[in-house]
Amino acid sequence: MESLDPNKANQALPRLFLFCIGGTGVRILKALTFLLASGVEIKASQVIPIIIDPDASGGDLNRTVELLNKYRSIRKSLEFSKNQFYHTDIQTLSSLDTTTKGSSMGGVLPPSGFKFNIDGTKDGKFRNFIAYDQLDQSNKSLVDVLFSEDNLNAELKVGFKGNPHMGSVVLNQFKESNDFKYFAAHFNKNDRVFIMSSIFGGTGAAGFPLLVKNIREADRNLAGNEFLRNSIIGALSVLPYFGVKPNKKSKIDKGTFISKTKAALQYYADNLTGNNSLNAMYYLGDTPISNYDNHEGGTSQKNDAHLIELLSAMSIVDFMDMSPKLATKDSRAIDPVYKEYGINGDVKNLSFRNLGQITRNRVMKGLTQYTYVNTYIRQQLESSLNKMVWSKGSKPSATKIDSSFISGDFYSGDLQQFNARFMEWLMEMSRNQRGFTPFKLDINKDQLNLLVNDIVQKKMGFLKGNTWDYDSFDGLLNESEKLIPEWSVEQKFMAIFYEATHQIYTERIAPQL
Amino acid sequence: MKDFFAFFYELFGLHSYDIAELYDYYATIGLVSVFVTLAAVILYYLVIDPVRRSTAGFWSLLMVVNGILLLIFNLIYLFRTFKYEGLDFSPINYLDFLLIGLLWNLIFFFLFSLLFKRFSTNCRRTPF
């Protein structure tokens, strides 16, 4: 088994400030969180997600924030010499303040959690935000030309309901906000920014160009402005990939998605890519096949996970892989990169075989390992607990992984819930259109070789077929346990499962690719 | 060698002068018992190294089965040898010896288990 010591290498890597704008940005962040939990490598010492979404009660948003908190809570108990699950350090913006920087910021309070606060969006109507009633008649007339009555009466706490022209007014408060100043003050020379948003909604389409503008033209009085203006910025713009069902009560109409996209692309061509504001720009989209329930926002806005969100998350990994190529001078990117993504075959339901080799190399191992862990936990853990050597410990002094661990905070409070969401995410992607079904999740206990779809696993013995069961899995766990008998129970649990699934992947699956 | 095994078989009060004809077979029976038990333990801990059957229950069953098989071997061996030499063989007369043999087989199995379990992956904590 290979020995890993990533902690030292990580210190030299840049930090990644990841701006997730709107509902799509949040769902991509969720996909990235699962990828990082499964051990997919991203070349960043820390990932700092910053969520910009006025729809504070959005179902997707709150589920993702909860997931990030669980990730951090799980990671706190782990170490990474023999385990790569949860390896990447995800931090909140406020957690970066370990020095005197914060105190020198003269009253700028650290932001709370992962959400970026923009003044005036928590409550109230758009007309109050722009102080419509205080305007003189000529200005009111101008506003009436630009915004409909519905726009003016829209509640901002549920976002911009697919209206980027509203979003561009509200989100222009970025640079004045406490959180932006805080972000600027903590941005260092080698740090990177990645912005992800959709182009066919309201929040993302409006927020993305504004954010880039505020970074590239950072106020010279702002702490860290020089680093910001010359930072390496990557961005992802998600083109339409789903539709919404017709709903008379909703202002969101899928018929406008394409026209909005065209208009926004034109704007981006002139003001973002056209003037080299970005070092790397990714475009992703798909023929919208699924029609989601049409909710304007709020707690009911919970869309099934989609392959596009996973591919979008991979673009972040790709961006951080492009280390030496990207550079910025005088606030302009030198030799910017533009990327799209294609799949092998126009099929309705994809497996790993439909992804390109580079993507497969990046994500297949981690996702497969973590899915095996989850399958084991779901089907076998209860039977093997307190019976197998890996649970009892290979010697009397070894740490026991027993029922008290299973009922403890780490497992039942965090890991079990995180894992349930991971499996739910896989199932959602599988049932969506276009679907992504890399795993067969309802396999029999004695046919673990069938877990990865479209892969015939390697035979492991002269007389054995390629089927294998939990005896083999437990055997690998026992073998891993011998190397780390006295680690803390949380570290030991993760490390033995990482090592065992690493063996499964490298011996049975990797040779067949 | 006979004296060596006589030490074991007579440790519990049985004396060869009680059943003098047995003394000549101590070595064969003793060596078979030791090597078969050793082979069973090595097979269990190192060759098969079972995952699901690494329980104390299965280990106990294996120990008893090993002991009974050796007891049957001893019985057949003594019967055939005595018959070959024209001696009368009635198992009831040698019950003490057979039971002591069984006890030693169980003890050998236990001691070999303690010795070899550390080299096992799946049965390192079997029987405890």
Image (cartoon, coloured by chain):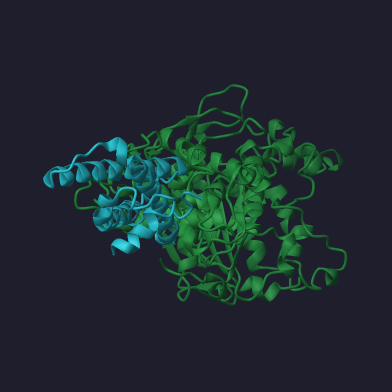
Residue A489: x, y in percent?
60, 55
Looking at the picture, tell me which residue is in the foreground, B50 or A112: B50
On screen, residue A156 versus residue A200, left or right, reads right
Looking at the picture, tell me which residue is in the foreground, A303 or A500: A500
Whether residue A507 is situated above or below residue A223 in the rendered picture: above
Whether residue B76 is situated above or below residue B121 in the rendered picture: above
Looking at the picture, tell me which residue is in the foreground, A53 or A416: A416
Residue that protrudes farthest toward the front in the picture: B17
Quadrant the N terminus of chain A occupies: bottom left
Whether residue A119 is situated above or below residue A134 in the rendered picture: below
Quadrant the C terminus of chain A occupies: bottom left
From where the camera sits, is residue A219 visible? yes
Give the total of numbered labels.
0
Q: Which chain is depicted green?
A: A
Residue A456: x, y in percent?
25, 46
Residue A74: x, y in percent?
63, 53
Task: Say which quarter of the image contains residue A328.
Answer: bottom right
Residue A452: x, y in percent?
34, 44
Q: Residue at x 51, y 50 (%)?
A: B128
Task: Say which quarter of the image contains residue A14.
Answer: bottom right
Q: Colour of chain B?
A: cyan
Looking at the picture, tell me which residue is in the foreground, A76 or A333: A76
On screen, residue A439 versus residue A418, left or right, reads left
From where the camera sits, is residue A360 visible? no
On screen, residue A39 versus residue A153, left or right, reads left
Whether residue A378 is situated above or below residue A489 in the rendered picture: above
Q: Residue at x 71, y 67 (%)?
A: A184
Residue that protrudes farthest toward the top in the picture: A248
On screen, residue A233 versus residue A407, left or right, reads left
